[in-house]
Amino acid sequence: MFAGEGDRKASKSWWPTDSNWQANAPYTRWTEKFDADFENWLKKIQAGDAEPLNYEKWRKKIRGGSNIRRVNKSVTETYGAFVETHLST
């Protein structure tokens, strides 16, 4: 969906695009919170209380705070190092 005025257009979607998800949730696992958030979003769409979001608004919804991203990155890197050190053949 494209919305805008005159020559200015913005791409909007009901759900985050795969490229947006991959770019902004690389260290995030699917969680019960995501499940609940997306179920609530679907209910808003069905009730007519939502409108498609642009890239930046989806980015903010799926990205999470910087502290959470740092912790997730650290856990992922530590896990990778452990596997490499102790489980590689």
Image (spheres, rainbow, N blue to C red):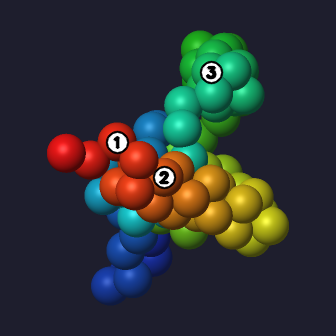
Residue drawn at point x = 39 percent, y = 82 percent: 8
Residue 10 percent location from the top left of the image = 41, 69
Q: Number of marks in the image?
A: 3
Residue 38 percent location from the top left of the image = 61, 26
Labelled disc at residue 35: 3
Labelled disc at residue 31: none
Label 2, secondary structure: give it. helix
Nearer to us of marks 3 and 1 is 1
Residue drawn at point x = 69 percent, y = 68 percent: 70
Mark 1 in CB contact with mark 2 (< 8 angstroms): yes
Residue drawn at point x = 63 percent, y = 64 percent: 74
User: What amino acid is at disc 1?
Assistant: Leu
Labelled disc at residue 87: 1
Label 1, secondary structure: give it. helix
Query: Above or below — where is 7 with respect to 55?
Result: below
Dot 3 crowding, Cα within 10 Å, few <14, some 14–19, many 20+: few
Mark 2 highlights which residue? 82
Query: Above or below — where is 62 with respect to 4?
Result: above
Rounded to the nearest angstrom, the CA distance separating label 3 from label 2 is 30 Å
Dot 1 crowding, Cα within 10 Å, few <14, some 14–19, many 20+: few
Q: Nearer the viewer, residue 46 or 27?
A: 27
- Quadrant housing residue 71: bottom right
